[in-house]
Amino acid sequence: MEYLVSAEEMRRADHCVIEEYGVPSLVLMERAALASVELMEREGFDLSRVLVVSGSGNNGGDGFAMARILYLKGIEAELWFVGNPDHLSKEAALQKKICENYGMKFVRNLPAGEYTTIVDAVFGSGLSREVKGSYREVIESINRHPAKVFAVDIPSGISSDDGSVQGTAVRAAVTGALAFRKLGHVLYPGTEYAGRTFLLDIGITKEGFKGQFPRVQAPDRGIFSLLPTRKAFGNKGTFGKACLMAGSRNMAGAAYLSGKAAAITGTGLVRVVTEGCNREILQTLFPEAVLTTEEMLSEETLVNALSWADAAGIGPGLSTGEAAEKELACVLTQAKIPLVLDADALNILSKHPDWLKKGDTPKILTPHMGEMVRLSGHSMEELKQKPLELAAAYAKEHEVILVLKDARTVVTDGERIVLNTTGNNGMATGGSGDVLTGIITGLLAQGMAPFEAAVSGVYLHGLAGDRAAENTGVRGMLSTDLLKELPGVLKEG
Ligand SMILES: NC(=O)C1=CN([C@@H]2O[C@H](COP(=O)(O)OP(=O)(O)OC[C@H]3O[C@@H](n4cnc5c(N)ncnc54)[C@H](OP(=O)(O)O)[C@@H]3O)[C@@H](O)[C@H]2O)[C@@H](O)CC1
Ligand SMILES: [K+]
């Protein structure tokens, strides 16, 4: 997995590499500048006439060094120093002086239309307060200019800690994230301001954390190595049994989507426990499933289904009526297997928060933001502001794994926090969550540990969405497209 760092964690790693390992900060700065220039070239920036806008911190220092590298390549690179000359960092002052020694041109404003590329090196991870006054005007003039914008490290004005806009922020086409992606590169709206973001190696590596690693990680292709291995001599019993308790009257689709997703994920046998009225449609759509259908599911039937399974998912399309309440209470009390609780199971739990204490089997809760408002009692605004902290606090308090679904889904057990970066807004469509429940339940049934199953499930679900976006487009994609793309995603891994 990839570390996503806060400004403070980045500062700690910087400091350690410079002070403890002894790498001179100017070496890091030179590498940052060289890697940034290379990235601009690779990304096809028109370098006919470049303006580098530098502030007085080390982000500005990177900018000065880039301008000098471009200038010495014969490119018409000019500088606009917008920082406070009395607050120049040691490195920035030196880099500025070098540019002056070479006789490079400094400008005092941003003439319209004269540059093809603007390099934003005003603020990086050292942004410490809201952007106001002349800095605000500088950033707004960069945004008004037609030149393509490259942001050094992070667009100026975006908080590295949470992706928020601190007053105003540069809108970049491309951002070169130095050493580690900051949380602000991944969280909204920062991620949109950053444009296409590339990670640049400048010599600050995880050794710089000295064993005190950042709290947040993002899953990457390493996830595929965690997936259950398929024994050549395995049979359908070896590959786990998943039980999906889903779909009330008129909600057969939820049972279908969650059950089928569990099967596609590689589960040997999938049982769908649902209302009798869904029998025919499920047998037609999903003949691979074992069905348990009754008009009123008895406790005995539920207990039998749970004892048959290796993992169960409950909630998609379940409804919140009395029968559904009884079903959930029974499952929470009787289950000895890991559970995924989704949709209506969460809506019922919001009314009976103490039910989470029933039983001691691992539980993965998969609320979207609206469901999380009801579950946690926090307002939507609070959740939007601090999704990571509030999700982790909830998971810790209730001893569950929480999958908080949003544009960037958070998975946490209260200690570990994973921020998923796959997926797209096409997945905000009916049934998408049912597919996720099925994937996670399927992975659990195959013996994955609950936290890994939740992280992998969210990652794979997002990859399927990204494939669907490529093949069908974000507007037209449906949850059934996620099922269609999932086998290809799994095959690739
Ligand atoms: N360590 C290293 O060697 C390496 C670091 N690297 C680079 O350094 C960057 C971090 O550098 P940094 O810590 O100097 O902070 P930076 O982002 O330049 O900002 C600080 C300046 O901004 C100012 N300021 C802040 N907010 C403000 C506001 N709202 N409104 C107005 N002013 C505001 C603040 O002013 P002051 O508070 O002093 O008044 C100060 O002058 C990092 O992103 C990466 O690009 C790489 O070269 C690799 C090696
Ligand atoms: K910047």
Image: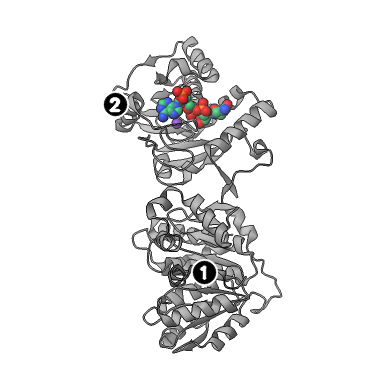
Residue 443 visible in the picture = yes
- Res. 142 image quadrant: top left
Residue receiving disc 2 = 113
The front one of 289 and 469 is: 289
Kindly identify the amino acid type of the residue bearing the numbered disc 1. Asp
Residue 122 visible in the picture = no
**Is residue 288 shown above or below 425?**
below
User: From this viewpoint, which residue is outermost toward the right?
Assistant: 233
**Is residue 1 shown above or below 136?**
below
The front one of 490 and 350 is: 350
Horizontal placement of 133 versus 457: left or right?
Answer: left
SS state under label 1? helix
Residue receiving disc 1 = 354
> Which residue appears at 49% of the width and 53% of the height?
390
**Is residue 359 shown above or below 400?**
below
Ligand 2 occupies quarter: top left
Residue 233 in percent (x, y) is at: 71, 75
- Quadrant of image for the C terminus: bottom right
